[in-house]
Amino acid sequence: MIVIMQPGATDDQIALVEEKLKKLGFGVHRSDGEEQTILGAIGTTSKEIDPRVIEILPGVSEAHRVRRPFRLVDRVCRPSGTVVDVAGVRIGGDELVVIAGPCAVESREQINRAADAVHSCGARILRGGAFKPRSSPYAFQGLEETGLKYLREAADAIGIPCVSEVVRASDVELVGKYADMFQVGARNMQNFSLLKALGNSAKPVLLKRGFAATLQELLLAAEYILAAGNPRVVLCERGVRTFEPWTRNTLDLSAVPVLRKQTHLPIIVDPSHATGLREYVTPMARAAIAAGADGVMVEVHDDPDSALCDGAQSLDPEGFSSLMADLKIIAPSVRKRLSDPARNVRPKLAKTIFSKAAIIGIGLIGGSLALALKEVGAIKQVVGVDKDELLNSIKVAGVVDQVYSTNEIEQALAGADLVILAMPVGEIGKTLATIGPHLSQGALVSDVGSTKEEICRAAHVLGKAVDFIGGHPMAGSERRGVNFSDPTLFHDAVWVICPNENVSEPQVNRFIQVIESIGAQPLKIDSKRHDQLVATVSHVPHLIAAALSNMVGRLGEEDELAPRLAAGGFRDVTRTASSSYGIWRDTLITNRELIELSLNDFRAALDRIESALGAEESLKEELTEAARYRLGIPRDLPGLFRPEYELIVRIIDEPGALAAVTTALARENINIRDIQVLKVRQDEDGVLRLAFNNEVETNRAAQVLRHSGHDVRLRSDNTE
Ligand code: PEP
Ligand code: MN
């Protein structure tokens, strides 16, 4: 504290102040100026001292706090900012979070309709009030517990978390039973017993600014919650009362950068209650994001004109969809992103399928699988096992609930009803033998190895009490390691399953449900047939690529012109030859016999082509047939895209040409599933291949792009 004495204050008066400060627990530093004396109170005291107790002493002119009254919410406590996790949705990270839904839950049908609408546009959290703190006692007060039930059901049906308001401390338990996040309304910002009760809860809190509260008062209210033990608070600016009658409140957007400077807590903006009128909501939401907010909360009603509460400020689904399209364009300019609604589409499962999964081997595949399982809620607990030296990086990556070292395998497997071996094929046999004694009765074991027959046979060591289903997700990435884990890695990928003979039908179906829940396409085939097919479509092509590479490489040693003439065609055919031996080693060794058979077939195919070389007609026949077959295969994309969902767009080689295409689509809220540049040569046009989620989106995209002057074709009528 700084105390400024009045000019002419007597020595006795100064001594009295010094004595008082010391009694309060401060050290005192005195500085005598020409006219005035200034006393600095140094150190901290356990209790907050009100400067006014000094200001009233005789001879004192002013007394000021130097330290701010809040501590835990202060930005200095966590300069990098806090991310608050709301049942898997992270507020405060690089993703903008949009919370949307009606002001109040009015009926089961109404909240379901609103939930579907906001969810399909990319809202990440559903809102809906069940306890409504209305200014008038005669206004609709909310459906209370029934409303909470409907809200929970609606949120579960679309698979996103929900937030609902709690108005008194005694309701914290009840609201917490249904909602994933508590909302404290503007009228309750300083309901301290409520704040303390929320401080004892483990669930996150959305704290709205009171309409006559300063930002410091808002931070002190948050401090109450943190001080009582709950660090998961998100602040919400929702407008303050001013003399302006043309809006319901005045949105104080400067609150966003000011709070950002003062606190590490995430900040969102509610433009609905701030403006009170639908037509102002979208512009102010755009401004909020531009000002740096971590997200917005917007009221959306499927039929706003018949809403029981706040209809005038509620957007209809169309208005909300257009708002989301705008935010998508603004997000990158503030280095944020808006989640892809397609990622939202997979509903969180209402029931868990397995209670504990142990994934042995947490690399790219194991880590991605763990993330995907946690995201959809297919499994209650997901633990990982790996070598000692990798445990730290796995912990940091945060992909599993708990991680164990290989010599703690017993603890990792205790109670696990699903065990996945996510390791190279060569290690699976050995691992099966070590885990055997620690598996629970009735556990289901699977793997992700790229050959199946030998592994399925080796799994017999597990005995009859354990079910083994060989697995092979046909997905991967050039990148390796847990840090590149991606929960969408398996979307649309074929996931081969080869159940051993003793596995019951219901158990197979359970596993199929897990695979489907993470967006992959299960395909049940016999292990031998799997190995034969992959020998032909994957392993032999790899060996051919290697052989061709070596042939040309060795030629290059004799004739230096060879590599200069080896152009695109050679590169395409030999692409897989560049992958590392380590990835292929085990696969090629375990599948050797079938590969040899398939190589024989290849020799025969080569002979056929060779003899056709001497006869024009047969050569034409061979090559035309090959072209026809090859053209029918979708391009090399993660997963199979249907050609009818793809567009080919010609773009001019000039700055911003690509942005023009993506912006035109973003403006219409059309999600680009995949994008590929097919040909870029200097001074020539480029060709883009765009993939979409479905036929409707594809047709809309074609229309939008044609409208903006682009040359667009459907991929299905294109010949590469
Ligand atoms: C609400 O969000 O439904 C609400 C009542 O808002 P506020 O507390 O900001 O008025
Ligand atoms: Mn409202």
Image (cartoon, rainbow, N blue to C red):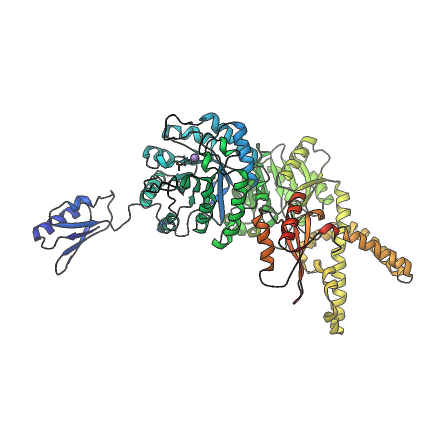
Eyeballing the image, is 220 above or below 76?
Answer: above
Is residue 603 in view from this perspective? no
Residue occupying image coordinates x 62% and y 50%: 704
* Residue drawn at point x = 44 percent, y = 30 percent: 175
Q: Is residue 442 left or right of residue 633?
A: left
**Which image quadrant for residue 135?**
top left
**Horizontal and vertical percent position of residue 23:** 16, 45
Residue for point 82% across, 51% down: 597
Q: Which of the pair 207/331 is nearer the observer?
A: 331
**Where 467 falls versus 398 (above or below)?**
above
Question: Quadrant where the C terminus lies?
Answer: bottom right
Q: Nearer the viewer, residue 144 or 587?
A: 144
Left/right placement of residue 265 relative to residue 327 reads left
Q: Residue at x 62, y 32 (%)?
A: 441
Residue 616 visible, this orientation: yes
Figure label count: 0
Asked if residue 122 lies left or right of residue 694, the reply is left
Image coords of residue 452 (percent x, y):
72, 44
The one nearer the camera, 635 or 513, is: 635
Toward the viewer: 209 or 611?
209
Percent across and percent down for residue 380 are 55, 36
Q: Is residue 491 left or right of residue 175?
A: right
Q: Position of residue 65 (x, y in %)?
A: 24, 49
Q: Is residue 201 above or below residue 342?
A: above
Q: Quadrant of ligand 1?
A: top left
The residue most toward the front is 246
